[in-house]
Image (cartoon, grey):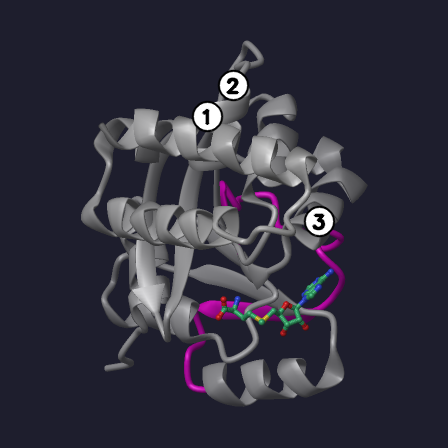
Amino acid sequence: MIKLSKRLQKIYDFIDDGSVVKDIGADHGKLIISLIENHKVSHAYANENKKGPYKRLELATKDYPNINISFSDGLEKLAKDVNTLVLAGMGGHLIAKILLDNAKKLDQIEYIIIDAHNDNSFIRKTIANLNYKIIDEDIVLENKVYYEIIKFQKTDKTKIYNDIELKYGPILVKNKPVLFIQKYQKRLEVIDKLLAIKSLSSYRKTNLKKERDVINNILK
Ligand SMILES: C[S@@+](CC[C@H](N)C(=O)[O-])C[C@H]1O[C@@H](n2cnc3c(N)ncnc32)[C@H](O)[C@@H]1O
């Protein structure tokens, strides 16, 4: 049985039993193999758009007839039965581009699970504008990096999130998991250190103080 990292395990946990998943940019294919090995899904799809990672994916999945792989870009080859997309381990802007390049194909997609390695605020806004709402979020710590995992579900009405929800995550703010508190306590320490620098511009100081107030408000 394949062992998943904490990050991939959280994504795995966010996938509903019996879904039809496509892992975009699957590379080593570990997530999709684990879903099949544990019979969480009956079959699944994965793609890669670069030769090296595609070769890795091909090799890793060769003994799994229920995993359909393709050498393709983003959503260009999307089987009709896929209802859940996973986009993990990429930057927020790349994830947004992949979705926006083929936005029409999202008609069939009920769930999108994201692990963006930066620009989470931008990705929350972009996917909300595509008529998805955030239904789950969590945070994992791996190799000293905090990863936010976000699960979106299709909705009829565009959900509007305020700036704090976009930046910090509406469900993370509500649930305040231990690692979320830890992440922002560390940020408060960094802010205090920066504010102690005498040469810091007053513009920067004002912004840092505003950020500190927002974080203190969220954590209280
Ligand atoms: C850092 S890896 C992450 C692998 C895996 N998803 C994970 O989270 O562990 C990102 C992968 O996305 C692939 N990728 C980037 N843009 C892509 C696109 N437009 N279509 C398909 N794959 C893409 C890259 O080739 C790379 O292998």
Which mark, by number, is residue 28?
none
Going by the numbered disc 1, the residue's amino acid type is Glu
Residue 56 drawn at (x, y percent): 57, 87
| Numbered disc 1: secondary structure | helix
Query: What stretch of residues is rendered in magenta?
Result: 63-87
Residue 182 drawn at (x, y percent): 26, 52
Which mark, by number, is residue 165?
1
Disc 3: which residue: 93
207 or 22, which is in the foreground?
Answer: 207
Helix, strand or loop: magenta stretch: loop
Which corner quadrant of the image does residue 172 belong to?
top left
Residue 216 drawn at (x, y percent): 32, 31
The reply to whether the residue tagged 1 has its Cβ within 8 angstroms of ligand 1 is no
Mark 1 vs mark 3: in front: 1
Q: Earlier in the sequence, mark 1 or mark 3?
A: 3
Mark 1 Cα within 10 Å, few/some/many (few <14, many 20+)?
A: some
Q: Is residue 71 magenta?
A: yes
The reply to whether the residue tagged 3 has its Cβ within 8 angstroms of ligand 1 is no
Q: Is residue 1 visible?
A: yes
Q: Quadrant of the C terminus?
A: top left
Going by the numbered disc 2, the residue's amino acid type is Tyr
Q: Are marks 1 and 2 in contact (CB under 8 Å)?
A: yes
Find the distance from the CA under tag 1 to the CA under tag 3.
19 Å
Query: Which residue is located at x 27 percent, y 79 percent?
Result: 3
Q: Is residue 62 magenta?
A: no
Disc 2: which residue: 161
